[in-house]
Image (cartoon, rainbow, N blue to C red):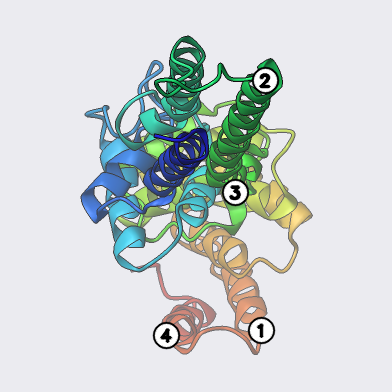
Amino acid sequence: MSDRARNGLFVAAMVLMAGVLAFMVSTEPATADRVEAIGVQIKCPVCQGESIANSPAQMAQDMMALVAERVDAGATDSEIIDELLSSYSGAVLLDPPASGNTLILWLAPLVVLAIGIGVIVWWKRHPGTESGAEPEPPSRGRGRLITGGVVLIAALAGIIVVAGSSLQERSGATAGVADLDTQDLDQVSNETMEAVVAANIDHPEINGMRVALAERYFEINDYRSAFPHYLAVAESESATAAETATALVRLGWMAYDGNGEVDAAVSLIDRALEIAPGSQIGLYFKGQILWCGAGDARAATELFNAVLSDPELPTESRTQIEVAQAMASRGEACP
């Protein structure tokens, strides 16, 4: 075989190898593989160094379910990762693990380098002069080595570019924790929210989630579960005025409804009304406590009237308060 033909085969082999490896790196995995590949990159917020793909925790399962849903919806890996990191405080992006599809990212440059060096060394030891032909000039041998080196470098550069572009779109996903108050928590279970709160007790933006969770408990009269969250928010220096007022109003009502403590309940609600004077629920609860707990129908009537003067009061609430106002105004006892 002539030197030109051998050189051509060498160049073609190197280009083909680089192309195959680049294709392997850039090819999208199957849906199940994508879900797993994304899951192993995200650290479980409530686990010790485990990814959400490998953790049995309820939160991790919720997060993996979200990944599968977003994959089916056609979201990109970076979009899914960004959503997970912004929705779950404490979740961070782990280094790409050296397994599965990401193993190619780690090994492809090494494979190209090893094969390329091997080919060049073999070629140098087998110059391939034909029988009866003159020995190959040193300049031609050096030229062949230079050509091989250039192709090898180009192949490595191609692999690095493809691998880098695959990871670059994830680089912004490690930014700080997103504002928890902007989340849609309707699809998040109580268990998951409890775990997030537990993992982020001192986070300045956890109060919004604590209030949302406490409200769920409050609505079903589970005061025991709601109390610690409302109390933490009421005592937090980072809580917003609205969050603090909500927590104080609920604590006041629980003090009365749960323990019959009228004075303590009124005091807590008064603190809330100093922060949010127009609080409908604060005024209504105080009216109920004064009427039913202290027997002060007159004061209760005034508070009910203040609530009813709000044009934005929901119709259902208005109907209920109108009944209470009518009874209190007639001096009737609280039912």
Q: Mark 2 or 3, which is nearer the eye?
A: 2
Between discs 2 and 1, the one toward the N terminus: 2
Please say if the residues under marks 2 and 3 sit with CB atoms less than 8 Å apart: no
From the viewer's side, name the closer residue of 147 and 191.
Answer: 147
Q: In this figure, which residue is indicated by the disc labeled 2?
A: 142
Horizontally, residue 293 falls left or right of residue 298, namely left
- Inter-mark Cα distance, 4 to 1: 14 Å
How far apart, in angstroms, are the residues tagged by discs 2 and 3?
41 Å
Asked if labels 1 and 2 touch by Cβ distance under 8 angstroms, the answer is no
Q: Which numbered circle lies on residue 310? A: 1
- Give the class, few, some or many, for how many residues have Cα within 10 Å of label 2's Cα (few <14, many ≥20): few
Q: In which quarter of the image is residue 236?
A: top right
Name the kind of residue labelled 4 in the image.
Glu
Tell me which amino acid carries mark 1: Asp
Q: In which quarter of the image is the N terminus?
A: top left
Give the amino acid type for the residue marked by disc 3 in the picture.
Glu
Q: Residue 94's x, y, as percent?
A: 49, 27
Label 4 sits on residue: 316
Read off the residue under disc 3: 169
